[in-house]
Amino acid sequence: MFCLNASIAMPEVTKRRRGAFILVLCTLMAMQLWACDKKGVDAAGAKAGAAAPSGPAPESKLTSSSKLLFSDDFESGKLSPRWSRGKGEGGVGKWMLKDGGVVGVDLRNDPLWLDQELPDKVRIEFDIEALSSVGDLKVEVFGDGVNHQSGYVLIFGGWTNTLDVIARLDEHGKDRKARNTRGVMAGHTYRMAIERTDSTLHWFVDDKLFMSYEDKEPLMGEGHRHFAFSVWSAPVRYDNVKVYDLSQ
């Protein structure tokens, strides 16, 4: 930083006034330099992708008064009749109990539907594990209990571990929410939860908000009251399902 040299021609003023005048000029120049530096820093931050912090993720609505409607840890040795295979594209594989959980492979979107009806305000918890590097962890919620894509489809690491998706009635629909995935780790058990208490579907993975889907016309009521596991081809294991009523 520099100040105006006192030898520069100035109006005839007293030495005291001249000193005050120089001080004011130096102050103004210093403020201008500071503003330029700040502008440069702000521009660099914007270029690097700096942004205002986002708001906090919504917390779970699960409370001590929430009623547990259904649970299954698949330890009985036999798949409960409350689960039934639905209709997709008729895969050659099957749903089976293995290693204390339910495993599906080569099912071509024939979901395994739970007959428990879901309330409009609900939390569904479950464990899920990819048994291959392909990923493709998929569930369906608020469907009709029979048909694939009759509700919302949630996919972590779909399309050969490239995309995360929440879709409404169509995995490939234009209104789906999709993004590049961070990648599913084969052999890692993810604890997932799906919650809805209003028009927005919240999807949690390992206790952190993963994705949300806001629907101006949420799928509710008749034809939209069931939850299912869903598999295209890659093997996936599911376990420890719990369904809670969040209306209380």
Image (cartoon, grey):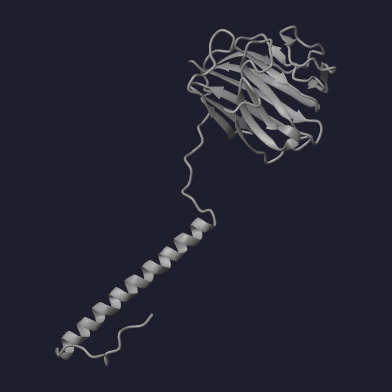
95 displayed left or right of 247: right
Q: Quadrant of the N terminus?
A: bottom left
Residue 101 visible within the image: no
Q: Where does residue 160 sit, x and y in percent of width and height?
A: 76, 35
Q: Where does residue 185 sit, x and y in percent of width and height?
A: 75, 38
In the foreground, 9 or 235: 9
Q: Where does residue 110 sit, x and y in percent of width and height?
A: 75, 16
Question: Which residue does the image show at 68% across and 36% down from the upper left?
Answer: 163
In the foreground, 247 or 151: 151
Question: Which residue does the image show at 81% across and 33% down from the upper left?
Answer: 132
49 displayed left or right of 115: left
Question: Which residue does the image show at 71% across and 8% down from the upper left?
Answer: 82
Residue 193 visible within the image: yes
Q: Give the tally of numbered discs.
A: 0
In the foreground, 152 or 208: 152
Q: Where does residue 94 sit, x and y in percent of width and height?
A: 83, 16
Rendered view: 158 above or below 26? above
209 displayed left or right of 85: left
